[in-house]
Amino acid sequence: MTRIYTRAGDSGETSLIGGVRVLKNNLRVETYGNLDELNSVIGAALTKIKDQEIRTILEQIQNELFNIGAKIANPKDKLAIKPEKINSIEKIIDKFDRRLLPLKTFILPGGGEAGSLLHITRTSCRRCERSLIAFLKKEGIKTNLPAYLNRLADLLFVLARYSNFLEKKKEKSWVKDADL
């Protein structure tokens, strides 16, 4: 019987693809760990999303995130994504955004179960974006991966709004408090 635990990480180190050992708080590990968390949060959101079109999009993104994480976990891999993937996300954003009323103010995260979970997913995506940028800057790597995550966060925002629209959940506007 193969065990899930290896005890190899008990000292606070882990292996990257290729066998290089690094501390578990290494920026590379932090970055692909945040992507793993985002992937899991998407999985949680999927438990409440009934719309098959949204489900298909998010399941595709889960696979893309897994592939990006694998690239980051491999120090020898080229950290890039095909520009078509970014363009595809932009087209999906435009498609869903056309179905919604235009925003006139900032809105508060929330709504129905699916919409609320997609807002949480969006904030998880922004954390991934921040850790990716810190990692890339430290390593001096130039890539289009930040554009992918930036677009993905925008998509998750639009899908949260659209899910709330489908669930007939009214968006709540942010009320600016000048006296705060």
Image (tube, rainbow, N blue to C red):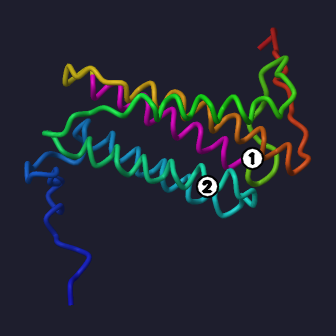
**Residue at image location 85% in from the left, 26% down from the top:** 173
Residue position marked by numbered label 2 in the rendering: 56
Sequence-wise first label, 1 or 2 = 2
Lateral position of residue 38 relative to residue 115, left or right: left
Q: Residues within 10 Å of mark 2 (few under 14, many from 20)?
A: few
Residue position marked by numbered label 1 in the rendering: 115
Q: Residue 129: name its quadrant.
A: top left
Lateral position of residue 34 relative to residue 104, left or right: left
Q: What's the magenta region?
A: 115-136
Q: Which mark is residue 41?
A: none
Q: Principal SS element in the magenta part?
A: helix
Query: Decide: marks 1, 2 in contact (CB < 8 A)?
Result: no
Residue situated furthest top in the rendering = 178
146 relative to 32, above or below: above
Where residue 148 appears, x then y in whole percent? Answer: 46, 31
Where residue 180 appears, x then y in whole percent? Answer: 77, 14
Q: Looking at the picture, which amino acid does disc 2 mark?
A: Thr
Quadrant where the N terminus is found in the figure:
bottom left
Q: Specify whether residue 94 is painted magenta.
A: no
C-alpha distance separating marks 1 and 2: 16 Å
**Residue at image location 58% in from the left, 51% down from the top:** 58
Q: How many marks?
A: 2
